[in-house]
Amino acid sequence: MTITRDTLHIVDHPLVQHKLTLMRTKTASTNSFRRLLNEVSTLMAYEVTRDMPVHMVEIETPMETMQAPMIDGKKLVLVSILRAGGGILDGVLNVVPGARVGHIGLYRDPATLQAVEYYFKMPSEVAERDVIMVDPMLATGNSIVAAVNRIKALGPRSIKFMCLLAAPEGVKLLQKEHPDVHIYTAAVDRQLDDQGYILPGLGDAGDRIFGTK
């Protein structure tokens, strides 16, 4: 299967690409990496939410009454894939602070590279709402496929996935298993290594966010 651009959206804004370059640098400090991820996530959130529905409300300007568009952030559910998803979540909440938030805890079995779930907590209002799932890296794709399976069981209206970096292998798997899920990323890198890390990538996003090894 080849990657299709129908559901793959690469956010190539110069500011996003500039900040991503700074994050890739191995000498970037934990504080710098965390701050840049927050900034990039906020910038990318504008693209991910570009087609959010709006409704007209009556407001009063200093000059007169008018009909003006507003979005309802409460109709949006953000799902953070632990642990590294929190680094993107805060940036998206800068744009839509009224969104509901859920969390899925997954870790990758080092032997099989398959996703193992250890935590699942969602808002009660997921059915018929729009969901944006966030995780800095789309590597093998096993974790996000497992996470989407769980969320689809709750009956959302739509699902999007937002990440900082993707590997071709992960994009292909997600598009194969869930062709209706749109993927938003700042870059699709060359490939995965034998341990399932993205090349050239930026290392382990969770370790760089939290300063762990």
Image: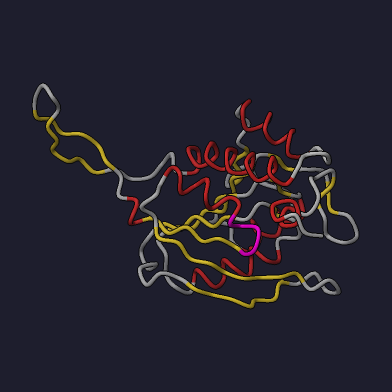
- Report the front residue among 36 and 149: 36
Q: Is residue 85 magenta?
A: yes
- Report the front residue among 66 and 92: 92
In the picture, which quadrant includes the C terminus? bottom right
Is the magenta region chiefly helix, strand or loop? loop
Residue sitting at x 58%, y 76% = 119
Tell me the quarter of the picture where residue 84 sits: bottom right
Tell me the quarter of the picture where residue 173 sits: bottom right
Q: Position of residue 179 (x, y in %)?
A: 58, 57
Q: Is residue 54 magenta?
A: no
Q: Position of residue 62 (x, y in %)?
A: 13, 24
In the picture, which quadrant includes the N terminus? bottom right
Magenta-tinted stretch: 82-86
Tell me the quarter of the picture where residue 113 sits: bottom right
Q: Position of residue 121 (x, y in %)?
A: 49, 73
Residue sitting at x 55%, y 60% = 80
Where 211 sits versus 32, above or below?
below
Residue extending farthest to the top is: 63
Residue sitting at x 63%, y 25% = 14
